Amino acid sequence: MIKSLNLHANNNKIAIIDNLAEFSYQDLLSKVDELCQYLKENEVNSNQIIAIYGKYSFDNIALFIALYLNQNTIAMIPNIAHTKSYLDSSNAHKLITLDRKIIDLKTSNPINNKLKNKNGLILFSSATLGKPKAILHDLSRLINSHKDKKERNLRVLLFLLFDHIGGINSLLAGLISGSTLVIAKDFTPQNICKSIEKFKVNILPTTPSFLNLLLISKEYQNYDLSSLRLITYGTERMNQNLLKRLKSTFKNLKFIQTFGTSETGILRTISKSSSSTRFKLDPNEYKIVDGRLFLRSDTMFLGYLNHDENINQWFDSGDLVDIDKDGFLQILGRSKELINVAGNKLLACEVETCIMELEQISDVIVYSKPSLITGEMVVCDVVSTLNKDDTKALIKSHCKAKLERYKVPVKINLVKKIDLTNRFKKDRKLR
């Protein structure tokens, strides 16, 4: 990994800024050497599965590299209060805590046949019933996907979490290109803007929901964000009207859509334009069947540790898409978010896009509720500058003019904010 990451070549360059402290690439190498010795002294053997918490810090990044060099499989446990189900699903032999305590765990270790002596990485996603899926990757393959990165003197804010495929992608791309990685400690719009100003951040990888929160907060008006050149967004669908608002606010910034899944890794995309939600993928990496997007990639996962699923070389992303005459894809929505109103099916995001055309509405989430008459009905929660009655009247009138009748929300709730997950995506599971 040291050779692949090219850490020696950057030597005195700043690699990581953590809580105001600056660490050079040489500092990172020294810390990795120290932790490799620590692993040896504490009998952390190669080929064992070692769980660590997915929280960014200089020490934790160095530990991640040291575990790779020690030929361990690394299980990235979400840095949340309740982690037992994640630890159980990981089959880890040991857990290394944030304060470097090593805790022995019981495991049946069923993954050796899948890895075949390769370095592994275990990430987690939630299944339909909320049980975490343990997703096994070949970590060397993920690293090698960045091997052609050119050296860049850029500062990148680590916004996407360490236990998320997008966060791993940001980390590897940043280190391999010799960039400076700025660790965010607080994900409020105020603190993110403050960090961009203080550390002269050039690139912000984030989510559409956070960008909308940034617009609502207006914190960008209180800080100098002139160092920022590029915002990349992913992990959830970008609303076209939200992107329009962003481009109107940040006129000199470039916006690029990233795309991938926890199972396939982050795929290379080409955005149609900075103001478009359409993008291209390598034609060999996708196919569309009945409007549904299937993916395959060089960074495809090896399988689930705790679920039996037949992948057959193609992974069903669950995304519904269309493709234009020039080969650019657009995500229409998730298949699991389809709403069935008396046999008529619609996507929640279609109604959200319509409602977000209204300048009085700063945020919205659309979902279904049971109906005795139609089976399901369309419901929405909105953040509005108007009072409850005026908001309802405006949305009803606008949707009736733009959408088929069955797509018009039956119930409209005025709320102070739309709940987000710890990954800064709209929390649709609460509905």
Image (tube, rainbow, N blue to C red):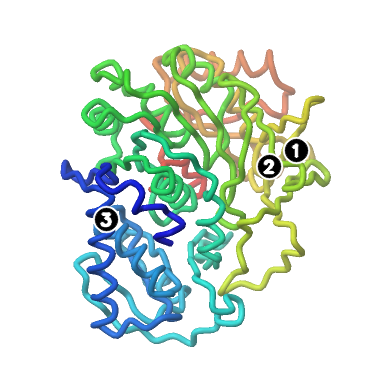
* Image location of residue 331, percent across then percent down: 66, 35
Query: Residue 302 versus residue 219: which sits nearer the camera?
Result: 302
Mark 1 sits on what residue? Answer: 345
Q: In the figure, residue 337 lies in which quadrant?
A: top right
- Gap in Å between the C-alphas at discs 1 and 2? 6 Å
- SS for callout 1: strand
Residue 177, placed above or below residue 245 = below
Query: Residue 245 versus residue 44: which sits nearer the camera?
Result: 44
Q: Are marks 1 and 2 in contact (CB under 8 Å)?
A: yes
Q: Amino acid at mark 3?
A: Leu
Q: Amino acid at mark 1?
A: Lys
Q: What residue is shown at x 42% (from left), y 71% (from top)?
A: 85
Q: Is residue 421 visible?
A: no
Mark 3 sits on what residue? Answer: 28
- SS for callout 3: helix
Q: What residue is shown at x 53% (from left), y 22% (from top)?
A: 243
Mark 2 sits on what residue? Answer: 338
